[in-house]
Amino acid sequence: MKPRSRKSVSVGNGTSSRLVRQSPSFPQKRESRDFLLGSDSESRWIPASAGMTQLEEVPSVSVRTYSQRRPATGFTLIEVLLATALLAFGLGLAIAALRSTTHSVRLSEEEASRTEMVRVVQQFLRRQFAASRPIVFSMNPDTFEITVFEGERERMLFVAPMPGYLSRGGTYAQTLALARAGSDDELQFSAQMVVAGALIEEEQPRPPVTLLEGVQSLEFAYRGIDETGVLGSWEPQWNFPDRLPLQVRIQVRFTDRNTIWPPFVAALPLAQLQSAPAPLELTSPDDQDQDFNNGEEQR
């Protein structure tokens, strides 16, 4: 009986090697007989029946069986869906925060614009009222009654110099009136030149200038000194066209509740010269004694 012959294959990684015994008489399964020999760039299967009868040394090779293969790497479908959902949720939060910030900035800018508009209009009106003058712009030819100021509930007319960039020289009769514009009202300003107590029609009249828009209600009120020298109450109409009122009040309410008109009261400095009470009649001491004696005689 011949001894069982065996074949051996030497495999290794370049630094060490080991023998793989192969027996042709007793075949074994592929997993134990065939080995994957190769490097990182090339691999090949070396079957046991290749006829190797001596020890051969294969440099720089690795041995991997089916059971030693690396598991598949990557993301599962659930992981991808979860990551996509988290990304969408984060983007939604970022977009919502951006929209909220943009809306807040826009509201702040609109409020600042409305506040600045109201401030500029009040400054212009206060300057014009302070420069008003008791200049005649109308006269009744029958009664010779003069008019230097007209004041109604929603309309006012007074004489004052125009600002330098709007003036063409001289004084102007300036009108403030509430005008209808669409669904809302607006405060309009217009001016007409005054020469020798009469209004002059210009060849190219200027259109009215809108000072305030979106006005819901507007009211002018006037205040002066009465005949007794006491400051009177606010009146919606000025009944003394031949003199200026001492103070003018303007109350405005806008359709937009966010727009606020601060309390506005302007003084007309030259009105004090016309509103001064009549001087008191002075009597001498002799006249006072005579009046006293007459009273005693009557008793």
Image: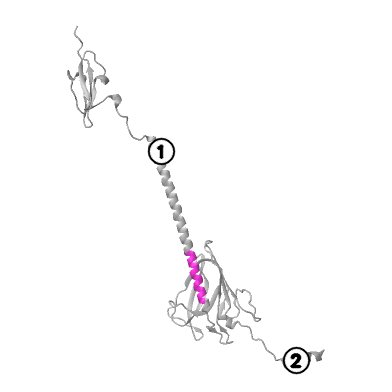
> In the rendered view, does 59 fall on the left or right side of 95?
left
> In the rendered view, does 43 fall on the left or right side of 72?
left
Q: Which residue is mark 2?
A: 289
In terms of secondary structure, where does tag 2 sit? helix
User: Looking at numbered disc 1 in the image, what kind of residue is underneath it?
Assistant: Leu
Picture layout, residue 258 above or below residue 199? above
Name the residue: 45% across, 57% down. Answer: 105
Q: Which residue is mark 1?
A: 82
Q: Is residue 242 visible?
A: no
- Expressed as whole percent of the image width and height from the top left, the position of residue 249 reads 57, 72
Report how far apart the C-alphas of labels 2 and 1 lie in the structure: 113 Å
- The foreground one among 186 and 78 is 78
- The foreground one among 6 and 18 is 18
Picture layout, residue 34 above or below residue 149? above
User: Looking at numbered disc 2 in the image, what kind of residue is underneath it?
Assistant: Asp
Name the disc covering residue 48, or none: none
- The foreground one among 260 and 209 is 260
In the image, the segment drawn in magenta is 113-128
